[in-house]
Amino acid sequence: MLKNKDRSSKQGNSAVIAVALQDHILQDLQLGTLSVADPAKTKVQKRENRSSSLKRNARAVVDTGRRKAPQGPKVEDPEKEYVLDPKPPPLTLAQKLGLFAPPPPPLSSEEWETVKQRSVLQGDSTQPCPICKEEFELRPQACLQAFEKFTSKKTCPLCRRSQYQTRVIHTGAQLFKAKCAARIQACWRGHVVRKWYQDLRRTVPPKDAKLRRKFFEEKFTEISHRLLMSYHTDTEELLAEIDRCLAVNRSVLQQLEERCGRELTDEDWGRIQMQALHRGAHECPICLAALSVSGAPSGTGPQQPRREAVLLSCSHVFHRTCLLALEELSWGDAPRHACPLCRSHYQKKILEC
C-alpha cells in the first residue's frame, strides 16, 4: 500500500510539474488563450474586477448651482520619462514551484538613472536604431514593440536577453534637436557670410585684372543708368541732335576727301619738291640711309647702288622700298596711309635719280 501511495504521489508530482512547465512555455510564447487556466473563469474575474473598480471610483455629485470653469485637456510633458511595463507579470506555476527563476523586481529611479548614464557614455543615442537603422527623431518610433510583436516574444534584438524592462527616454530626441539647431545656425551663418561677401564685391574692386575690369564696367553702367534715370530725356530732341552731329561729320569727311582725294598737278609737285629741297633732308627717315635724289648732294663715302626715292604730298622723302614695307606693315590704315613723320594722309610720286 505504501509503495502504491508513493508511486501515485510521484506520478501526481510529475503531472503537476509537466502542467507547470507547459503553462510556463505557453506564457513565455505569449499564447495566453491556450493556457491551462479556464478562460471562462478569467473572463468572469475580469468583469468582477472592473465592476469593483467602478464602484470604488464612483462619487456622489452635488449640484451647488455654481458655474464651473471649463477645464481644458491636460497637456503632458513631452520630455517626461516613463516605464512601459511598470508592473511585473504574474508568476507562473513553474516559477512558483521553483522550476524557473522569477522575473527581476522593477528597477528603482536610481537604478534607471545609472542605466541611462551608462547608455549615454556608450553613445547609444548617437547611433542609429539597431532595428530600422534610422536616426532617432522627434516623432514616435515603435521599432521595439513591432519587433516584439513580430517575434512573438520579449527578447532583446542585440543580446537576445529575455525578461527585460523598458523605459522611454528622450536623449535621442534631444540630440536630434541640437543637431537641427546646429544645421539651422550653419545655414543662417552661411547666408550672412554670402550676403556680406556680395556686398563686399559690390563695393571693393578685386585685384584680378579681368574681375577688376568687369567690376568697373558694371559700375560705369550703373552710373550711366542712374544719370539717364535722373534726367527727363526727350526722344525726338535726342534723335534730332544725333542727325545734326551726323550731318556735321559728313561735311567734315567730305571736305577731307576733297583735300586729300584731289589729284595734284605738276606745278603742285614742283612746289612740294622745292619745299623738300629747302628742308635739306639727305637721309631716309626709315632706314637712315642716304637718299639719291637729283639736286641733292651725294656723300663723300664709297658709291652705293642707287635706290628709288619717293616724294610724298607732305614734302617728306623716303626710299620707295622702305615706304612700301612700312605700308605693308601698317595694314590697319589701308587704303589711306599716313606719313610716318607728320601722320597726314598723302599722295606719292617717284623721283628721278
Image (cartoon, rainbow, N blue to C red):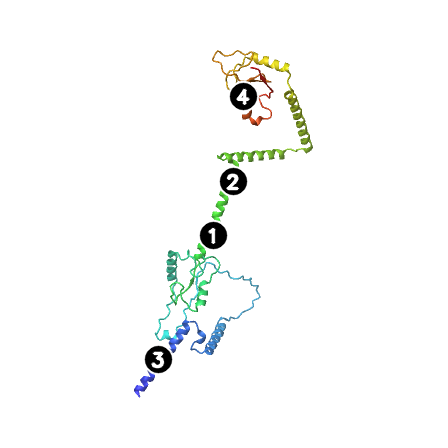
Amino acid type shown at disc 1 = Cys
Amino acid type shown at disc 3 = Ser
Say the numbered circle drawn on residue 198.
2
Q: How many angstroms separate mark 2 from mark 1 (CA)? A: 27 Å
Where in the figure is residue 64, as x and y percent of width and height? 56, 67
Quadrant location, the C terminus: top right
Name the image quarter holding residue 63.
bottom right
Which numbered disc flags the more N-terminal residue, 1 or 3? 3
- Neighbours of disc 3 within 10 Å: few (<14), some (14-19), many (20+): few
Which mark is nearer the camera, 1 or 4?
4
Look at mark 1 in the image and give the residue it sits on. 180
Secondary structure, mark 3, is helix
- The reply to whether callout 1 and callout 4 are in contact (CB within 8 Å) is no
Is residue 248 depicted above or below 57 in this figure? above
Name the image quarter holding residue 268.
top right
Look at mark 4 in the image and give the residue it sits on. 321
